[in-house]
Image (spheres, rainbow, N blue to C red):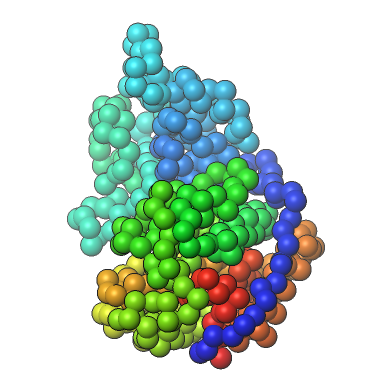
Amino acid sequence: MKLVELDIPEFSHSINQPEINNEIYENRLKRFKKDLRDNDFGSAVIYADREHFANMHFLSNFDPRFEEALLIINTEDDDILITGPENQGYSNISKIKLNKINYPTLGLLSQDRSKKIDIFEILKKNIKNQNKKIGLVGWKYFTKEEFNEPKHIYDLPHYIIVSINKIINDSSKLINITSWFNNPNNGYRAINEIDELAYMEYSSCHTSNSIKNVLKNIKENISEFEAASYYKPIGIPLSCHMMFSTGDRVKLGLSSPSSKIIKLGDPYATAYGVWGALNCRVGWIAKNEKDLPSYSRDYFEKLIIPYCSAVKDWYENISLDSNGGLIFNKVMKKIGDPFFGVELNPGHLIHKDEWLSSPIFKNSDIKFRSRQAIQMDIIPATNSNYFSTNLEDGICILDKNDKKIFNDKYPQAMERIELRREFMINKLGINLQPEIMPLSNIPAVLSPFILNFNKVVEFR
């Protein structure tokens, strides 16, 4: 591992955002209804709010804005979307046929509730086959390590659960089936359509170009707000808030930019995520190690070299022949010492939400599969004078057949992917397996001393 002077290529980006068409949503819904029938469910109730929208969006293309929403899927009857008043118009963005109901309690406080619409009566009328099981979908599924009966633990609002229980009068019929969507092994959203992957590549071009633009324009004596203005968002919905912090504020971890003035020798952290992509970089406001505080000047040897060794192992070992446990072991062998403070999974699945779930954990036997989108996300939190580093980018996995399908439909995106592969293999020294498709326009580019942006880590 060493620092080298390197011009970072411009990998370009698509002008037009790929579309997830109606047929894809209709096929998702058909599959879901079949699975409900095959498992003796009569209906499913899916809850969403502004942040926890992705499972509802997966089936319908609708995400509630400002409000919450309920989607009732009946196996043999009409499907129902319940929203507050503000989302009645926006609900027409749905790409599946839905009967729509306005329930003001899902709307903002102090809006008119004088009509006294009863959620119990709405649910009683629209949940069909009440003698069968009812699936509940929220944001999370739970495990036996957390609860004795995880299938009967729900993260939907209490008043909705109470109302459904009154209807069926048998709480044993209420089953949390969120894992059908989010499980890293067999969840619906763990494997993507080709169009969804192309959408993610589009998003990743934007977020990675934005991060690159911020990093190239960081200067001493400007505010964090001014630095963050270089993100230049184009309006893709955010998957998380923008993050930028320097100096003592980086200890907060997830903070948004402020009026703080950036100083030489400050640590910094920046991240930007939209639907389908996130990129993050962490380092120092410095030209070289001499600009660091005296107690951190061996930062490159102490932290960057072992960290990048773990990153190299991550990229070179992830494949259709490997599983999450192998990747976990490879990473933790290099930076498992408590000094590095790696607590989160070293990598996870990504979708419209920033973190779907992860197949990468201790003793995981979950194999990687074609059409998965995976975040290279290894975060050392040393809680020391060495601060941290981070090199967070996305990839997808495509076998030979899926690669051909992708290339036939999105040849320009595949050309960008091949250029990124060539850059990572030939310039950075990361030997990717043939099925690994980098999505970021700053693929594995790490400049530890950001005032010298083109001085990057070579992984040989």
Identify the residue at image location x=66%, y=73%.
8
* Residue appearing at x 48%, y 33% in the figure: 64
- Residue 145: which quarter of the image? bottom left
Is 274 placed above or below 390 here?
A: above
Q: Is residue 317 left or right of residue 201?
A: left
Front residue of 399/208: it is 208
Q: Residue furthest left?
A: 148
Q: Say whether residue 35 is visible.
A: no
Residue at screen point 37% across, 31% down:
130
Q: Quadrant of residue 301?
A: bottom left
Q: Which one is in front, 427 or 421?
A: 427
**Front residue of this view, candidates 212 and 208:** 212
**Left or right: residue 93 compared with residue 45:** right
Task: Identify the residue at horizontal 55%, vertical 44% (top origin).
Answer: 237
Residue 314, given in percent of the width and then of the height, sits at 49, 79
* Residue 348 visible in the picture: yes
Residue 260 image point, x, y percent: 39, 53
Extreme residue in the top direction: 114
Looking at the picture, tell me which residue is in the foreground, 60 or 6.
Answer: 6
Quarter the C terminus occupies: bottom right
**Image: 131 above or below 358:** above
Q: Residue 359, percent across and down? A: 43, 68
Residue 248 is left or right of residue 196, and the answer is left
Provide residue 230's location: percent of width, then percent of height. 58, 53
